[in-house]
Image: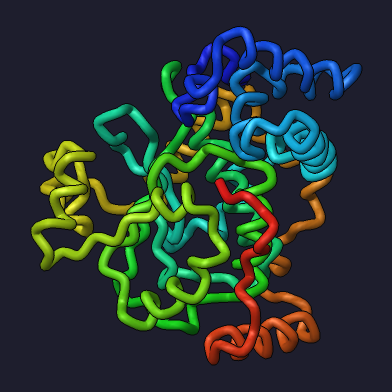
Amino acid sequence: MNSDSNKSSLNGFEKSLPPEEYLNKIKEVRTLLGTLTEKSSEFCSDSAITRYLAARNGHVNKATKMLKETLKWRAQYKPEEIRWEEIAREAETGKIYRANCTDKYGRPVLVMRPSSQNTKSYKGQIRFLVYCMENAILNLPDNQEQMVWLIDFHGFNMSHISVKVSRETAHVLQEHYPERLGLAIVYNPPKIFESFYKMVKPFLEPKTCNKVKFVYSDDNISKKLLEDLFDMEQLEVAFGGKNSDAGFSFEKYAERMREDDLKFYGNTTVSSTSAHLTNSDSEVSDSEMKQLEDKEDEKIKNGTLQSPLDTTKTYT
């Protein structure tokens, strides 16, 4: 298991403070956390505490509160116990997967394709997202703590946006995976998504907005961002790269993930906590909840509902 204790943070927070003050803040957080279980103690490395401090702009009490909530969430949700066999149904279409390549800085890459959504249950979708995040983190090199997202909007329309999933995704990422996002590349988004993004942008932290880059295949200036970030020989063709073998294959990816489960966890047993999530749970959501979600989706698409992103939160 990767405790990330030896990874150096690249969020810049520690560089903005004198070394002594930076270390003192970490010590203050540890003191406020009190006695921890072995698993929680392993999670709370110096670099992890640094990420939470950065997410709360160096405010010790706020960072401690945020970290305590994550420890509580991890104890209940048990993300480290999610195994491939539990979420394989969600992965069939390649809507989220870890690419074979990294960027030039060694950061793992999560490819996301919103138009490839294949299930209706937000619980299954969020659990799959958490599995993907945990897997990407476990595959971080020793000198990295962040990842890159490549979001492919080919075939996208507004029916692929779920308010309920958007809300829960934002909550999980901003509250429990702070400072894990290095860069999010939005590739060939349609005009309709640009309008949606403009609506939610005011609710994002400026530093988060700076991590979101729009890239268009017919714009040489924005394409240069990909060329500067990736070895184009390794990047898959869908993003303008030259690697025609780098697309998604469910069978090959399943094999990779099973190998990772065995490598990092030593077994592929599904946790008892998640045993209730059957295939039917992943495919069909509660009808009453679905009706409410559809109404909220329609409102936000018409601009009559507040953004799913909470204005009081700090995001990734």
Does residue 245 appear in the picture of this structure? no
Does residue 228 appear in the picture of this structure? yes
Residue 237: name its quadrant: bottom left
In the rendered image, the vertical position of residue 141 relative to residue 83, given as above or below: above
Residue 92 screen position, x and y as percent = 47, 60
Residue 295 screen position, x and y as percent = 68, 90
Most foreground residue, 130 or 275: 130
Residue 204 screen position, x and y as percent = 54, 59
In the rendered image, the vertical position of residue 274 relative to residue 271, given as above or below: below
Q: Residue at x 69, y 34 (%)?
A: 80
In the rendered image, the vertical position of residue 89 relative to residue 182, given as above or below: below
Quadrant of the drawing holding the N terminus: top right
Q: Residue at x 71, y 33 (%)?
A: 59
| Count of numbered badges drawn on the protein | 0
In this rendering, would 57 be left or right of 28?
left
In this rendering, would 131 be left or right of 107?
right
- Residue at the right extreme, as displayed: 35
Most foreground residue, 14 or 154: 14
The colour scheme applied to this rendered structure is rainbow
Q: Residue at x 32, y 56 (%)?
A: 213
